[in-house]
Image (cartoon, helix red, strand yellow):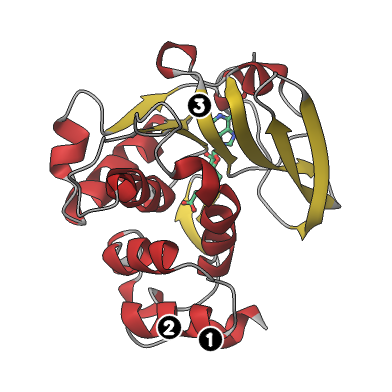
Amino acid sequence: MAWSCSGTTNAELISNLIRKKLISSDTVAAAMTAVDRANYVPDKRHAYEDSPQSIGHEATISAPHMHAHAAELLLRYLRDRPDGRGARVLDVGAGSGYLCSVFHHLVVRSGGGGGDGPRGVVVGVEHIPALTALAERNIRADGLGDAIDAEEGIVLVTGDGRFGYAPKGPYDAIHVGAAARTIPPALVEQLASPGRMIIPVGTYAQTFVQVDKDAEGRVTQTDLFGVVYVPLTDRPDVKV
Ligand code: SAH
């Protein structure tokens, strides 16, 4: 099903994802339309295919339908928070930077009008320094240099994402883009009340798990569907 969403342009890819009901909200459609996938893949000829692609260092840019799923599942928590502030988002395993940009459009739009509302912050954590640099280049090439240069906009950090990034938390939404053997406790700790994390869990057979923290801090876990992600690992040169 997913592969049939491929298009020859970014707009065609997004409209195919809408047609197949992989994108259901106008806001996610607008955010994914604003992010040109050609700026995030190494081979632009395959930019609009609904498939994961290698970006080096054993990492892949996920398939667009997975990015769509992630944005749709977190959408409620990407809107302005009840106290009127913009949402704070953590993207673990930022890789190409594609999803950081999609989240950025969603939290900036979250005021309800073209960026006039409160601005949220997106923190991308990536453990391979060359990929953090790649993400930054891609995001700048996609026209979001201002968000990178702002103190809070898109913040890219090199580090072990299993420990989250406490200085910018707590986070209303956390996306983990690589599979964890077990759910890292630091990520649950850094989840706001209320907040939502989606994370692939498992080794060979992986499940996309939704972790919800309610306003009282109660945590519940829901298994969503089977997925295939690269593992969340120790950096090859560093053992933690
Ligand atoms: N959402 C990204 C997915 C990249 S693949 C995209 O679509 O482009 C998964 C990423 O997780 C890789 O870039 C990999 O280097 C990173 N990763 C793996 N283990 C990690 C860890 N412990 N901490 C931070 N990043 C990690």
Q: Quadrant of the C terminus?
A: top right
Asked if residue 209 lies left or right of residue 143, the reply is: right
Q: Residue at x 58, y 18 (%)?
A: 190
**Which three-letter amino acid code belongs to the residue tagged 3?**
Tyr
Q: Which residue is mark 3?
A: 171
Query: Residue 218's image quarter?
Result: top right
Helix, strand or loop under label 2: helix
Q: Which residue is mark 1?
A: 19
For the residues bearing labels 2 and 3, Cβ distance under 8 angstroms: no
For the residues bearing labels 2 and 1, Cβ distance under 8 angstroms: yes
**Which three-letter amino acid code belongs to the residue tagged 2?**
Ser
Ligand 1 sits in which quadrant? top right
Query: Residue 141's image quarter?
Result: bottom left
Considering only vertical position in the picture, is 215 above or below 91? Answer: above
Considering only vertical position in the picture, is 77 above or below 72? Answer: above
**Residue 15: assigned label:** 2
Q: Residue at x 52, y 75 (%)?
A: 50
